[in-house]
Image: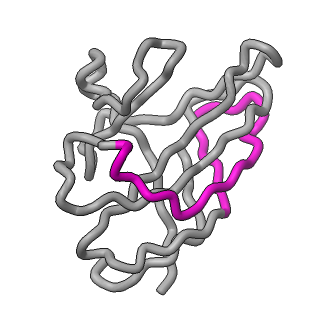
Amino acid sequence: VTTAANVASVNVSVEQTMGAPNVTVTLYTIPHSVTVDTIDIGQLTQIGQATVAAPVNAALTSVNVPITGAVADTIGTDLVVEVSTDDGSVDGTAFYIGSTTSAQTHTSFISSTSCGISDPTPTADIGYPEMHIIQAVNVTD
């Protein structure tokens, strides 16, 4: 994308859900100069956020999250899409993001304070080199 991009929604792939956990999508921009194999959270600028309920007891599907956010300078900044969910230990829900072993267009990252991964870390660095997270960002002009 070489002109301003307005995000209208994000399709998040779902490997499996237990119950109907809430899924939050947060959009950020990050300077293009930040190396692609890292996410320096200090460089992130939030541009949008939305929460939806994931499909109930679903497997191998996706959920569309309507969300707005504008990337005014697509040359100098990149888009970062964060997908998060609440800790389901209280209400018995769970969300497992969908992934594939097919080639990816950008490194997939994961973080989880309860798993001891406080900073976004490439999935390959935690022993899952073939875990490529599936998301589709839907933009308008």
Q: Which residue is drawn at the image coordinates 39% and 83% (left, top)?
A: 4
Q: Where is residue 95 drawn, in percent x and y?
A: 63, 28
Asked if the stretch drawn in magenta spans residue 56, the answer is: yes
**Quadrant where the image shows the N terminus:** bottom left
Q: What range of the chain is rendered magenta?
A: 41-66
Q: How is the image coloured?
A: one colour
Q: In the image shown, does 43 or 106 lie closer to the viewer?
A: 43
Q: Where is residue 49 drawn, in percent x and y?
A: 62, 56
Residue 131 falls in which quadrant of the image? top left
Q: Where is residue 56 drawn, in percent x and y?
A: 78, 34
Q: In the image shown, does 120 or 16 lie closer to the viewer?
A: 120
Above or below, 132 relative to 18 = below
Above or below, 100 relative to 52 = above
Q: Which residue is drawn at the image coordinates 74% and 40% (left, top)?
A: 55
Q: Where is residue 109 drawn, in percent x and y?
A: 35, 35
Above or below, 100 relative to 43 = above
Q: Which residue is drawn at the image coordinates 67% and 55% (left, top)?
A: 50
Residue 130 falls in which quadrant of the image? top left
**108 displayed left or right of 135:** left
Figure label count: 0
Q: Which residue is drawn at the image coordinates 51% and 68% (left, top)?
A: 138
SS majority, magenta: strand
Asked if the stretch drawn in magenta spans residue 68, the answer is: no
**6 displayed left or right of 88:** left
**38 displayed left or right of 45:** left
